[in-house]
Image (cartoon, helix red, strand yellow):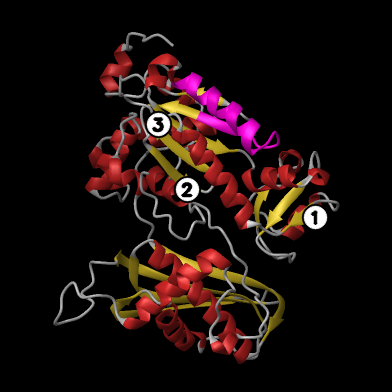
Amino acid sequence: MGARAPSREAIELGLNLAEPATLVIDLNCAFASIEQQHDRALRGRPIAIGAYDVDAATIVSSSREARDLGIKTGMKVFEAKAIYPAIIIREPNPPLYRAASDQLIEIMDRHSPDVLRMSIDEASMNLAGTPNLKKLGPEGVGMAVKRAIRAEIGECVTASVGVSTSIWMAKQASNLDKRDGLRRIDHTNLISVFEGLGLTDLSGIAEASARRLAKAGIHTPMDFLRATNSRLRGAGMHEEVAGGWARRLRGFEVGAFEHAARKSYSHSHVMSRATTSQRELEELLMRLSDMVGRRLRSAGRRGRVVSIGVVYRPDVGHVSRQMTLSEPIATGDEIYQAARKLLAARDPRLLVGTLGVGLSGLIEGDEGQLDLFRPGAAPPRNEKLEAAVDAIRDRFGEDAMQRSRLLGRAPVVRDRIAFGNTGHPDEKGTRS
């Protein structure tokens, strides 16, 4: 696409006038389409991936056929069955999805040395300075990636490609056509694209954020684009955040703010059989705490605020509690010991159907002083031990090693992949 002269409005709004060199590749219906590629019997049929094999579980992916029936991510399994009783429900197969994710990264690496894995089904690349930017153009590279996905990952797996001047804007472009599309947003069409979107169509703007913006008179993406920093601060945004959004909406890369560190890590489990047993709940809590700790360590983070959530079954309410510790922690045992105290807040007479544990109040792992008298000292022995266990589980699976209390127990907590995460224990969301 040849360069076009910017419009007066684009100049007045301060849009990024550069030629796009950033692509975002988003695998469509990722988990479901990968399952269809893996199992021919599933092709062309409505399928959904449930977090667990129970009707109360949440659907984390649905095939195109299921989506055409109105079955979407975030629904409960029983809601999907009400829409289409013959829907095929599968539990997640994280190793299968990780393998496809790795293939996607390998394909993208052929076109640029600057590739970022954004989540297990989405990645971006910067083509600036690469031979293919001039030879093929960003759209040409996008088409080449699509062909390679079809040839190497499989014909059932498609991808939406977004082209723009920043990762966030390229992601917006990829969202414009989630059925194997290729779309571009630059200064020539940004305004017309925004005029066709709602606030919550913008990545990072959920319903709660939209309500806060509405209180400041910001109801549409164009209102957002034209809003002054003072108006954004009136919507409750800190000055740095408001400035970041002002640049992001104009097509500029915002850097670290673009991929702000997550604020918490958590893991929950929907039980196939609700229970009041303290022993069973403690053992489940121990597994969940281990998995949260593992994710924390893989990201190089520690946290001070431990929380638990309990959902009773049948639907008779829930309880959540948290405590703030004096020192940041990162090991499963430390999380478990704190969470077990919080578990005492549950009503022992009621059946527990879902249990979750989380850690927030995060800092980088090296921000905490591990030893009061030896700054920068090596991690304590228990952290070294858990790191060694992590390495064994990475290679041989989640249940390769267990605490003695859990030996012989069924591995009720499955390997899971959180949205916005790669599912790779060692993936820290940095550019490769």
Q: What element carries label 3?
A: loop
Q: In which quarter of the image is residue 410?
A: bottom right
Left or right: residue 299 versus residue 363 is right
> Which residue does the numbered mark 3 point to in the structure image?
112
| Residue closest to the eye, 322 or 178 | 178
Q: Which is more foreground, mark 3 or mark 1?
A: 3
Q: Residues within 10 Å of mark 2 (few under 14, many from 20)?
A: few
Q: Is residue 45 above or below residue 22?
A: below
Kind of residue indicated by mark 1: Lys
Q: Is 330 on the left-hand or right-hand side of 392? A: left
Mark 1 sits on what residue?
81
- Residue 188, how many percent across, how many down? 40, 16
User: Residue 171, which numbered label?
Assistant: none
For the point 73% across and 58% down, the residue is 77
The image quadrant that residue 311 belongs to is bottom right
For the point 44% across and 23% down, which residue is it?
185
Question: Residue 24, position in %: x, y?
Answer: 47, 34
Front disc: 2 or 1: 1
Looking at the rendered image, the quarter that the C terminus falls into is top left
Image coords of residue 275 (percent x, y): 68, 84
- Dominant SS in magenta: helix
**Stretch in magenta:** 138-161
Query: What numbered label is drawn on residue 206?
Result: 2
Quarter of the figure with residue 17: top left
Identified by mark 2, the residue type is Ala
Q: Residue furthest right?
A: 86
Who is closer to the viewer here, 409 or 203? 409
**Alpha carbon distance from label 2 to label 1:** 27 Å
